[in-house]
Amino acid sequence: MSTKTLVTALAVAAVALPAATASADPASSIKADLSQLTADVTSADSALTADLGKVTADLQAGYASAARTDMQAFRTDRQAKFGTAKNDLEQLKSDLQAARAAKVDLSALRPDIQAARDAMRSARQDVRDAAQQARQELRDLRGSHDGGATVSPSSLANAGAAGNAIPAGLPGSTSK
C-alpha cells in the first residue's frame, strides 16, 4: 500500500468516524443540543437583564443620554443572542427530525426537554420583568417633572443628544 493511499484512507476514516458516531446515538446529540441551547439562553438572560438594569439605573438617575446608549447596547445584544439561540434551536429541530426518522425512542429525554423549557421560560420572564421595570422608570421620569408634565420619547432623545437629563423647556432643565 502506498503512502498516498494510506493517507487518503486515514483522512476518509477521520471524516467518517465522527459522522458515524453522531448518527449512531441521536439521543446524545439531542441532549448536547439541549445543553447548548440552555447555556446560550442563560447567557442571553444574564446579558440582557444586565443591559436593562443599566437602563433602569440611568433612568432612575435621570441620565437620558446614558439610558439611550444602554438601550442601544441592549438591542444589539438581543439581536446577537437571539441569533445564537435561533441557530441552536434549528440544530435541535434537525437532530429531533433525524431521531424521529430513525425511530429512536425519545421518551428518556422528556425530563431534559422539560428542564430546558423551564430554564428558557424563566430566562424569558427575567428579561420581561427587567424590561417592565425599565418602562416603569421611563414613565416615572416622564411624569416626575413639575405638575406631572408629560415628556415625549423624542424630547428624551433630544435631551440625550444635548447631554441634558431633563428636556429643554421643562422646569429644572439647564437650557431654555
Image (cartoon, rainbow, N blue to C red):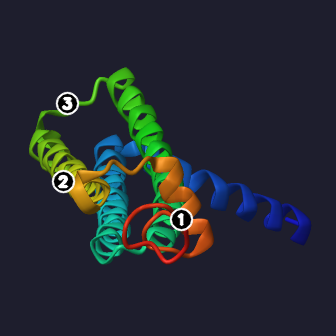
Q: Nearer the viewer, residue 90 or 101?
A: 90
2 vs 1, front mark: 1
Category of crowding for the residue at label 3, using alpha-carbon neighbours closer than 10 angstroms: few (below 14), some (14–19), many (at least 20): few
User: Can residue 68 be seen in the rendering of this structure?
Assistant: yes
Does 137 appear above or below 51? above
The image's mark for residue 159 is: 1
The residue indicated by pointer 3 is 105
Q: Residue at x 40, y 44 (%)?
A: 24
- Helix, strand or loop status at disc 3: loop
Name the kind of residue labelled 3 in the image: Asp
- Outermost left residue: 111
Residue 142 is situated, as x and y percent measured from the top left of the image, at 31, 55
In the image, which is nearer the foreground, mark 3 or mark 1? 1
**First reached walking from the N terminus: tag 3 or tag 2:** 3
Verify CB contact (< 8 Å) between mark 2 and mark 1: no
Residue 67 on image: x %, y %? 44, 68
- The residue where tag 2 is placed is 129
Rendered position, 55 above or below 119: below
Q: Secondary structure at mark 2?
A: helix
**Mark 1: which secondary structure?**
helix
Query: How far apart, in angstroms, are the residues tagged by discs 3 and 2?
Result: 38 Å
| Spatial CA span between label 3 and label 1 | 60 Å
Foreground residue among 123 and 152: 152
